Amino acid sequence: MRTRLLGFTAALLLAAFGAAVPVAQAVVPAVVPAVTGPECVADGAGRVVYDSAAGLWMCTGGQYDGKPITTT
């Protein structure tokens, strides 16, 4: 009986975490200010690069250094 209860509890926890991840991912982009690709390179100092660790396109250098890119 304990094994079934433990398995059921683990399944509920995993289901709760699985449901929470998309919500957390949806909230994060709304909080972080972002720029477009043309805005990044408009001043001539910025450039768009892919950050494989974060899985995002980022602006490096220039006015928007370190900001994620939203559109091309």
Image (cartoon, rainbow, N blue to C red):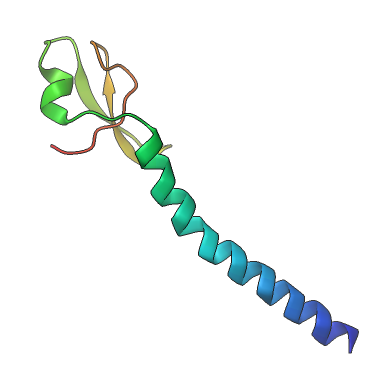
Pick out the residue farthest to the right: 2
What x and y, as percent, mark residue 58?
29, 29
Which image quarter is the C terminus in? top left
Residue drawn 10% across the image and 16% down it: 42
Which image quarter is the N terminus in? bottom right
> Height in image: 28 above or below 22?
above
Residue drawn 89% across the image and 83% down it: 2
Residue drawn 46% across the image and 55% down it: 23
> Height in image: 12 above or below 24?
below
Q: Taking 64 as reference, is 51 left or right?
A: right
Q: Taking 17 as reference, is 28 left or right?
A: left
> Height in image: 9 above or below 1?
above
Query: How many tags in the picture?
Result: 0
Q: Quadrant of residue 40?
A: top left
Q: Taking 69 as reference, is 6 left or right?
A: right
Pick out the residue farthest to the bottom: 1
